[in-house]
Image (tube, rainbow, N blue to C red):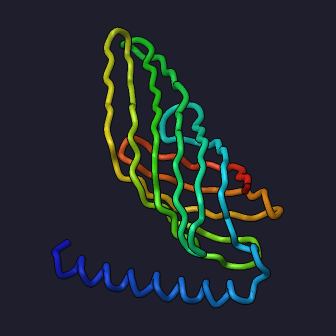
């Protein structure tokens, strides 16, 4: 993509985001106080990683604007073992991330969000005596949905993608 097309795409995307945020603010003004407030929160999720048997993460964050929050997390893909002609291969991953979150309230208690940040992680593959380890910092991008069950408890589903892996997960958040 050349620079001119990239600029046009970014301008169009900015316009769409601004329109969506204005619409969300208009909806928010008619909602009861706290209806979309994530506040300060902690949570845990489990899910299906692109490698490994199970992915899990714990996270915490803070909504400091009606449509913007930040979040930090620890991510772990548990070991996957595959037997092959060269021996048993084992893979695992752990990472820490920080991300900005854009929040779009849709209706009472339900919102969708987008996430953009960085993840530092270590991915490792072992086959017999051969060991390859990749430690790297990569961009993190994600999308998801959140439904507030009570003023303090919400459930959420999200997909996160980064260079060393991706994770589709579901979890619970607690607002304090």
Q: Position of residue 20 (x, y in %)?
A: 53, 84
Residue 121's place in the image compared with 161, above or below, is: above
**In this picture, residue 87 sits left or right of residue 105:** left
Depth check, front residue: 13 or 71: 71
Q: The C terminus lies in which quarter of the figure?
A: bottom right
Quarter of the figure with residue 10: bottom left
Depth check, front residue: 63 or 14: 63
Depth check, front residue: 141 or 26: 26
Q: Residue at x 70, y 72 (%)?
A: 36
Q: The N terminus lies in which quarter of the figure?
A: bottom left
Q: Position of residue 7 (x, y in %)?
A: 24, 80
Residue 174's place in the image compared with 121, above or below, is: below
**In this picture, residue 176 sits left or right of residue 13:** right
Depth check, front residue: 150 or 52: 150
Residue 60's place in the image compared with 76, above or below, is: below
Q: Residue at x 43, y 42 (%)?
A: 165
**In this picture, residue 167 sits left or right of residue 41:** left
| Total count of labels | 0
Query: Which residue is the extreme one toward the top?
Result: 129
**In this picture, residue 134 sits left or right of residue 103:** left
Q: Residue at x 66, y 71 (%)?
A: 111
Q: Residue at x 31, y 14 (%)?
A: 130
Q: Position of residue 122 (x, y in %)?
A: 39, 32
Q: Position of residue 173 (x, y in %)?
A: 70, 52
Quarter of the figure with residue 144: bottom right
Query: Which residue is the extreme one toward the right?
Result: 150
């Amino acid at each position: 993509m050349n620079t001119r097309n990239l600029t046009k795409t970014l301008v169009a995307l900015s316009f769409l985001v601004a329109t969506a945020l204005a619409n969300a603010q208009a909806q928010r003004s008619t909602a009861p106080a706290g209806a979309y407030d994530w506040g300060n929160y902690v949570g845990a999720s489990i899910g299906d990683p692109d490698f490994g048997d199970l992915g899990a993460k714990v996270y915490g964050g803070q909504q400091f604007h009606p449509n913007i929050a930040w979040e930090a997390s620890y991510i772990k893909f548990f070991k996957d073992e595959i037997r092959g002609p060269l021996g048993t291969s084992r893979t695992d991953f752990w990472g820490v991330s920080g991300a900005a979150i854009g929040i779009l309230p849709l209706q009472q208690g339900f919102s969708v969000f987008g996430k953009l940040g960085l993840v530092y992680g270590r991915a490792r593959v072992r086959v017999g005596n051969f060991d390859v380890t990749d430690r790297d910092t990569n961009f993190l991008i994600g999308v998801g949905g959140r439904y507030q069950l009570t003023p303090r408890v919400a459930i959420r589903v999200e997909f996160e993608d980064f260079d060393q892996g991706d994770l589709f997960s579901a979890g619970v958040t607690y607002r304090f």
